[in-house]
Image: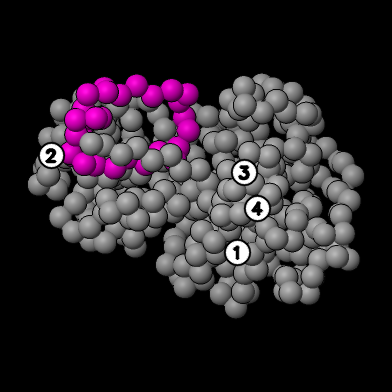
Amino acid sequence: MRAARMHGYKQPLVIEEVPAPDVAVDQVLIRVGAAGMCRTDFQLVDGYFRPFNEMKFPVTPGHEIAGTVESIGSLVPKSAGLAEGDQVVLVGGWGDGTCRQCQMGNTQICGHGNWPGFGPYGGYGEFVPVPYEYLIHVDPKHGLKAEELAPLTDAGLTPYRGLKKLRDAGALGPDRVLAVIGVGGLGTYAVQYAKLLACGATVVAFGRNDEKLAIAKDYGADAVINLRGRSADEVRKELQKATGHTEIDAVIDCAGAEDAIRTGFSLLATGGHYCSVGLVGTTISIPLFPFVAREYTYHGSFWGNYNDLREIIALAQQGKIRHTVKKIRLEDVNENLELLRSGDVVGRAVVVY
């Protein structure tokens, strides 16, 4: 098979012919139809995760995967409901099945798990072996394309879980303002989920690119504000002009940039909730006294679990999710990693085979 593989940190991926993977008796071989390109992929190449997980090369990136069932291991139970040719998406976080988080269903935060795209096999290769428990069948009658489905497994999944946390914490509701910070691959989905889950709150998208903000507006944001070159006080004035409010009650931060986090907290209302799902910077710095005295709540939210993704696929099959996708060839993967680094991809770049 063809694969774009990482042979070392801070080196271009090498597109090469490699053996197709062997499949264990409890695994399913997936023919990759499309693989979303995530910021995480160039961060992996750049060594962002190296302090937490030293890689063994070669590595095939790509953790946003949709495709079809190529073959099925002999011990995969009939109850899994899988057949050759089925359209599927992959749940990315594979747990060890024994820890407390796995038993709660949150395999993506298992301390001893593994992920496709962070080892020998990932979506930047034409085939991926997958434990059968981490596949979700997609009904073909809805006509969803692989390039629409693949981004849902991370770009579409991660903000959904974060917004559910805000909703379940009681942070959303009428006469409240929910901010979506960052309107890249994750943020374009976050705006849509915000309108579905925010219980009547006003949704404001914050970003630095007018083209991306225009998409957020088209996808349902009640207002959009460009942060580029503006102080927190200037942003506050824009917020008041757009919504009649000078503060925000909840934030889903899809960027994770340190300056955006500082701006977000400076606008947060007493009792406000802030949920970080994006990873651009490496540290955060926020004033302690307002954090305590105004009783802020800070949520970390990582990826999503099997049930989260099932809910998203159901929404997609009901036609409730729109997509901004840039289809690319595997041969153009390095060029598009550079565009991701510079923030010049609108929506989601997706490798399509």
Q: Quadrant of residue 300?
A: top left
Between label 3 and label 1, give the one nearer the viewer: 3
Q: Which amino acid is tagged 4?
A: Ile
Q: Residues within 10 Å of mark 3 (few under 14, many from 20)?
A: many
Query: What distance separates the C-alpha of mark 2 from that of mark 4?
Result: 41 Å
Residue 35 percent coordinates (x, y) = 65, 49
The image shows residue 165, relative to residue 296, as above or below, that is below
Q: Which residue bears the numbered disc 1?
A: 145
Who comes first in sequence, dot 4 or dot 1?
4
Q: Which of the two marks, 2 or 1, is nearer to us in this view?
A: 2
Q: Which three-letter amino acid code belongs to the residue tagged 3?
A: Cys
Pointer 3 with pointer 1, Cβ within 8 A: no
Which type of secondary structure does the marked residue at label 1 adopt? Answer: loop
Residue 286 magenta: yes
Quick check: 53 left or right of 210? right
Question: Does the residue at mark 4 contact the one at mark 3 (Cβ under 8 Å)?
Answer: no
How packed is label 1: few (under 14 Cα within 10 Å), some, or many (20 or more)? some
User: Which residue is painted at 46% across and 29% down in the image?
Assistant: 280
State the SS at label 3: loop
